[in-house]
Image (tube, rainbow, N blue to C red):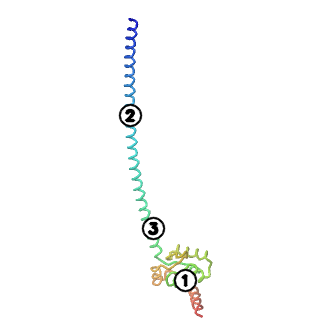
Amino acid sequence: MVGVLTKEVAMQSLQRKLSKDLFDMDTKIKNSFCVIKEEFEDHLDAINQNTDEIQQHHASLCELNNKIEKLNEKVDQVSAMLKEITHDRGSITLCHDEQKIFLALYIAEGFISFDEICDKTHFNQEYVHSLITSMLDKGVRMMRDITEGKLYFRMNPYFKARQVKENIVKIDPSVVNQSENKVLGSYF
């Protein structure tokens, strides 16, 4: 019986030791998880702060981009105004064929189609296109319109009024005579 009692006491002692060891291990694991949890929370706080900072930077960049776009628009306006001012001074010299197109636009009441310009001048479309582009580059002001897929042009009214007053574009008399002869020929 003493042997059984000793075994029972040894068993209880072993159970207490195992219980204490398990409790110590459980406490160490809980403490380790608490440390890990704190590190994760710190890491999460850092991520949230970085996210807020990135959002602020993005908002600042968007605002800066909008300001740059507005600045570009202003620069374009100033550039157009300067171009207009430089073209408003002095005269514009056009080649013989450009003068024919100029007269067709000048004489027309309102818009004239691209095809009508080709018919009046007897030039092909590519050539008329290149001449109109050249005239625009030289400072002749025109208005363009596209209606039902057709391209129409008209002399800018302000530019036309300046032409009447200041004779900005010099027209060769032979071009004027040809134009008058065509108009008279259409009556007979």
Q: Secondary structure at mark 3?
A: helix
Q: Amino acid at mark 3?
A: Ser
Front-most of residues 131 and 87: 131
Asked whether the beta carbons under mark 2 and mark 1 sit within 8 Å of each other, the answer is: no
Left or right: residue 15 compared with residue 93: left
- At 45% from the left and 66% from the top, the residue drawn is 76
What distance separates the C-alpha of mark 1 from that of mark 3?
30 Å
- At 58% from the left and 75% from the top, the residue drawn is 129
Left or right: residue 111 compared with residue 126: left
Q: Quadrant of the C terminus?
A: bottom right
Q: Nearer the viewer, mark 1 or mark 3?
A: 1
Report crowding for label 3: few under 14, some 14 to 19, many 20 or more residues within 10 A (C-alpha): few
Residue 32 higher or lower than 51, as above or below: above
- Percent x, y for residue 150? 55, 76
Left or right: residue 166 compared with residue 38: right
Q: Which mark is residue 104?
A: 1
Q: Secondary structure at mark 1?
A: helix
Q: Amino acid at mark 2?
A: Lys
Q: Identify the residue position indicated by label 3 in the image.
A: 79
Q: Identify the residue position indicated by label 2 in the image.
A: 37
- At 45% from the left and 69% from the top, the residue drawn is 80
* Label located before the other in sequence (2 or 1): 2
